[in-house]
Image (tube, rainbow, N blue to C red):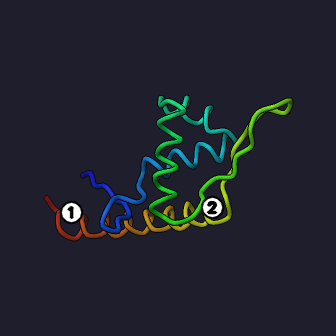
Amino acid sequence: MRYKVWLEEGEHVFGEGLFTLLREIEQEGAINRAAKNLSMSYRQAWGRIKKAEKRLGFQLLLTRTGGEAGGGAELTPQGKRLLESYDRFRQQVEEAIQDAFRKNFGKL
C-alpha cells in the first residue's frame, strides 16, 4: 500500500520533498550540504524553498553568507512550526490509513 500526502491551496504548497529538504537543512545547518545529501543541486533546493515561501506567505529559512565562519541556514520559528505540524499531520494520516486498511483489507 502506498499513498502521498501534501498541502495544497489551488496549487501544491508543501509535501514530503520539501519536508525532507527542510529537515536535512535543519540537521546540516546549510542548504548546500543538505542538497548534496539529497542528490540535488543547491540551485534546485533554493528554488524549491523560495517557491514555497512565496506560496506560504512567510520565510522558512534564515541564511548567513560565507566568510571566515562559513555560511549557513536555519529554520525560522514559522518554518519549525510548519515542520512540526506537518510531521504530526502525516503521522495521524498514516495511523488513519493503516486503520482503514486493516478494517477493509485485513482479512484478505
> In the structure shown, which secondary structural element does the residue marked by tag 1 occupy?
loop
Q: Which residue is mark 1?
A: 106
Q: Is residue 84 above or below residue 15?
A: below
Mark in front: 2 vs 1: 2
Quadrant where the C terminus is found in the figure: bottom left
- Residue 40 versus residue 97: which sits nearer the camera? 40
Residue 29 locus on image (x, y percent): 70, 42
Q: Is residue 108 above or below residue 9?
A: above
Residue found at x 46% / y 46%: 48
Q: Is residue 10 above or below residue 28?
A: below
Q: Which residue is mark 2?
A: 80
Residue 95 locus on image (x, y percent): 38, 66
> Type of residue at label 1?
Gly
Residue found at x 21% / y 63%: 106
Horizontally, residue 73 falls left or right of residue 53, namely: right
Q: Quadrant of residue 105?
A: bottom left
Horizontally, residue 61 falls left or right of residue 14, namely: right
